[in-house]
């Protein structure tokens, strides 16, 4: 499997299970209706676990542009692969969101609240204050990427698509990537982020998690869906990238 296809599949799995649990909790007439925040955070954590576990051996399982950019900023991932990885992640996010709609189509039709329908695709703040919303996402993504930098075992995806255990930078052997990463620690980290920091904005902490599904929301034929809130869409893109860059900077400073 090519790294590009692997990132599509891994991100698709993440969004299918993550947005799927949101749909199960908030849409009308589901078995999990009103299951609560704990159910949602666990569903997202399992989505991360399944996505990483499935494709780690093929692409390193970034499944998140913030992770990809953070690794590249830290000098642990080839910049030539950043844009292809991000493209694959956004495509995977859109596909996963589409599959959620297929699975819950009747329940989308039975739900009149346009905000709940949007919540099954993309994030939005409970209190709209762009500076505060931005900082919340920066902090959450900083913790995610900083944690990933220290959780992951060595490995590196080169520009020619070869996954290497060790590379040489400035005469020193180093390596990085999520290919050798145990999926469970990252899933637990995301669970903790959701429980502790997810309240203000819904913890996007992943541009592809928000952008791909938001695009799909704008395209799907859901009669009661309302707008896709593009005015907010820059926050879950710019803030996670900022948080990832800051995490990589601190990682380099401490290394």
Image (tube, rainbow, N blue to C red):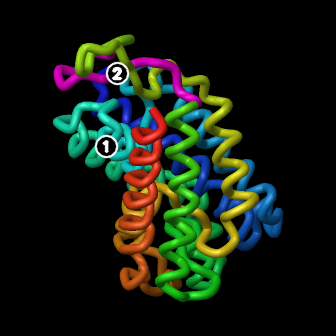
Q: What span is in magenta?
A: 151-163
Q: In the displayed structure, does residue 185 sit left or right of residue 244?
A: right
Q: Which residue is mark 2?
A: 156
Residue at position x 34%, y 52% in the image: 90
Residue 234 coordinates in the image, percent (x, y): 36, 74
Front residue (pair 183, 89): 183
Q: Is residue 253 left or right of residue 102?
A: left
* Residue 18 visible in the shown view: yes
* Tag 2 secondary structure: strand
Image quadrant in which the N terminus is located: top left
- N-terminal of the pair, mark 1 or mark 2, is 1
Residue 155: percent from left, percent from top: 40, 18
For this view, does 234 lie left or right of residue 180? left
Q: Label 1, label 2: how many angstroms apart (C-alpha)? A: 14 Å
Q: Which residue is mark 1?
A: 73
- Residue 92 seen anywhere in this rendered image of the structure: no
Secondary structure under the numbered disc 1 in the rendered image: helix
Whether residue 245 is in magenta: the answer is no
Q: Which mark is residue 199?
A: none
């Amino acid at each position: 499997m090519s790294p590009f296809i692997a990132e599509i599949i891994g991100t698709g799995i993440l969004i299918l299970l993550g947005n799927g649990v949101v749909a199960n909790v908030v849409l009308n007439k589901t078995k999990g209706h009103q299951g609560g925040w704990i159910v949602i955070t666990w569903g997202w954590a399992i989505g991360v676990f399944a996505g990483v576990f499935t494709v780690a051996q093929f692409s390193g399982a970034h499944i998140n542009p913030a992770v990809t950019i953070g690794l590249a900023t830290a000098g642990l991932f080839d910049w030539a692969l950043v844009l292809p990885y991000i493209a694959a992640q956004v495509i995977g996010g859109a596909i996963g969101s589409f599959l959620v709609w297929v699975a819950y189509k009747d329940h989308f039709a039975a739900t009149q609240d346009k905000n709940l329908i949007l919540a099954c695709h993309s994030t939005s703040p409970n209190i709209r204050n762009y500076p505060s919303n931005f900082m919340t996402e920066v902090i959450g993504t900083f913790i995610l990427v900083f944690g990933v930098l220290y959780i992951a075992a060595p490995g590196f995806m080169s520009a020619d698509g070869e996954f290497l255990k060790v590379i040489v930078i400035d005469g020193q052997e180093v390596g990085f990537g999520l290919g050798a990463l145990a999926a469970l620690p990252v899933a637990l980290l995301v669970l903790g982020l959701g429980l502790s920091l997810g309240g203000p904005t819904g913890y996007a902490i992943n541009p592809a998690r928000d952008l791909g599904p938001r695009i799909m929301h704008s395209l799907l034929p859901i009669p009661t869906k309302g707008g896709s809130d593009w005015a907010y869409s820059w926050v879950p893109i710019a803030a996670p990238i900022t948080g990832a860059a800051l995490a990589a900077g601190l990682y380099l400073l401490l290394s």
